[in-house]
Image (cartoon, grey):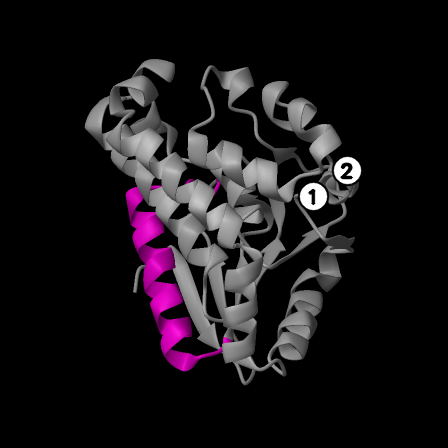
Amino acid sequence: MSELVTVNEEESYVLLSMDDGKANALSFAMFEALNTGLDAAQAAGKVVIIAGRPGKFSAGFDLSVMGGGGDAMVSLLRQGAELSKRLLSFDVPVVLAVSGHALAMGALLCLSADYRVGMKGSYKLGLNEVAIGMTLPWFGIELARARLEETQLNNAVGLAHIYDPEGAVSVGYLDEVVEEAQLLARAAELATGFAALNMPAHKGTKARIREPLMARLEEALWRDFEAGDAAIAAAV
């Protein structure tokens, strides 16, 4: 298991802690580590908590790859999309302990989990792609359309508005915010409560709730990666 993600199995949940020592960039190695951690949680059949490092949940895709364009960039985007799909349809509840800044793909992870706890402070959350010269891929559009407040969609996506934690709750990136010292304890409390659910019923009901979104995501993935490789490369 890569040290990028530490896996700790507790009685009621499995905690995956991301820490690359910097901004928790979502690189090929980080995606591999997260998926390995999710494999372990799935095998244990326990609720998952994904946490970031202090002050940084994730600043998004690895810019060294994104800036290079080409096949590597498209491959990294695809891995992000596939991780979102996996979280949305995961067998057990997925809780995020959003420990600081969550931008770009980091914000899309917030739109892919079942429950998101943030913490108070001067942290930035949102989809800043338009501000940095990137057209948001179709899979990101569909996640935003499904999980953000409809009246704020243009502001949040088309105008790249960045929110503080309280604003992120109002628009739909987070479900609640707590004091920094309480973040992991609150995530653990929620995970322990969710562990009492009937997991087959949870999985089946979640699939029904998200069936329209998953269908739209499949179409989005086709547009992004089958029909649209060249379009993605040109948009960045």
Please state which of residues 61 and 199 is positioned toward the viewer in this rendering: 199
29 in magenta: yes
165 in magenta: no
Which segment is the magenta one?
Answer: 23-46
Q: Secondary structure under badge 1?
A: loop
Estimate the spatial distance between the alpha carbons at disc 1 and disc 2, rounded to whole Å: 9 Å
Q: Quadrant of the N terminus?
A: bottom left
Determine the residue positioned at 53% across, 18% down: 130
Residue 38 % position (x, y): 39, 65
Is 83 left or right of 141, judged from the image as shown? left
Residue 167 % position (x, y): 77, 37
Which dot marks residue 172?
1
Q: Quadrant of the C terminus?
A: top left
Residue 43 visible: yes
Residue 37 % position (x, y): 38, 65
Of all residues, the one furthest to the left in this rendering is: 71
Residue identified by numbered label 2: 167
Task: Name above or below for residue 57 compared with residue 149.
Answer: below
Please state which of residues 163 and 81 is positioned toward the viewer in this rendering: 81
Residue 92 % position (x, y): 50, 71
